[in-house]
Image (cartoon, rainbow, N blue to C red):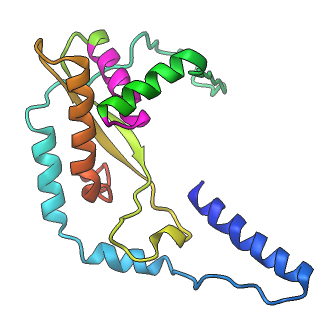
Amino acid sequence: GWCVSVLINDFNELLSAAIKGSTADLSPVMPYSNYINWLKTIDREHSLGHWKEYLKGYAAPAEIPFKTRAVDTTYVEYSERLEIGGAVFKQVDTLCTTLGITHNTFMQGVWGYLLSRYNNTSDVVFGAVVSGRPADLAGVEDMIGLFSNTIPVRVQYDVDTTPADLLKMLQEQSIQGTSHHYMNLSEV
């Protein structure tokens, strides 16, 4: 999605210039190889240490509730859509603003809490997709290439943890983990 936006902007500039009979004023190309070279400079052991500490003590994998084993292994496409809008969205948005969290953190908190209840535990881990574009790499916003990654998200609480505290904790963990988003989930 990110790359499409960059490509559309470049195409729009090329088309506008062609219509006007002028030369397109495109930004310099930021090669994906800059990202590959950036990866070579990263302290992987430090990042692995971060994830090891983050997941320390986690024992039982969470199960998706109500899953059934299909006898037939034929793939059948299915999708479901849930939209949060109107007054409910405004309430969620106000809560997120008040707590200083993102909508993404809110949804991860709700999903994690739901998984924890279905699994009768107060500690669950699930995967979440991140953009993977490192903020300290110059020009990364304009690069074309695959940066997205899946990282573990841990939702852990106790009887004294309020929903607001849980959401703030998830937001803080998200911020602390940002510099480690490039690690492959298989390595983590």
- The structure residue drawn at horizontal position 56% and vertical position 70%, both measured from the top left corner, is 144
- The structure residue drawn at horizontal position 32% and vertical position 26%, both measured from the top left corner, is 109
Q: Position of residue 56 (x, y in %)?
A: 9, 38
Left or right of residue 14: residue 181? left
The quarter holding residue 97 reads top left
The quarter holding residue 7 reads bottom right
Magenta span: chief secondary structure:
helix
Q: Position of residue 4 (x, y in %)?
A: 65, 60
Q: Position of residue 72 (x, y in %)?
A: 58, 18
Q: Nearer the viewer, residue 83 or 33?
A: 83
Q: Nearer the viewer, residue 53 or 22?
A: 22
Q: Nearer the viewer, residue 9 or 3?
A: 9
User: Is residue 181 at all visible to an observer of this figure?
Assistant: yes
The answer to whether residue 139 is above or below residue 153 is below
The answer to whether residue 6 is above or below residue 33 is above
Left or right of residue 55: residue 91? right
> Does the magenta run of residues contain 39?
no
Q: Quadrant of the N terminus?
A: bottom right
- The structure residue drawn at horizontal position 28% and vertical position 54%, both measured from the top left corner, is 178
The answer to whether residue 126 is above or below residue 52 is above
- The structure residue drawn at horizontal position 76% and vertical position 71%, both measured from the top left corner, is 11
Please state the extent of the stretch shown in magenta in the rendering.
100-116
> Does the magenta run of residues contain 114?
yes
User: Is residue 188 at all visible to an observer of this figure?
Assistant: no
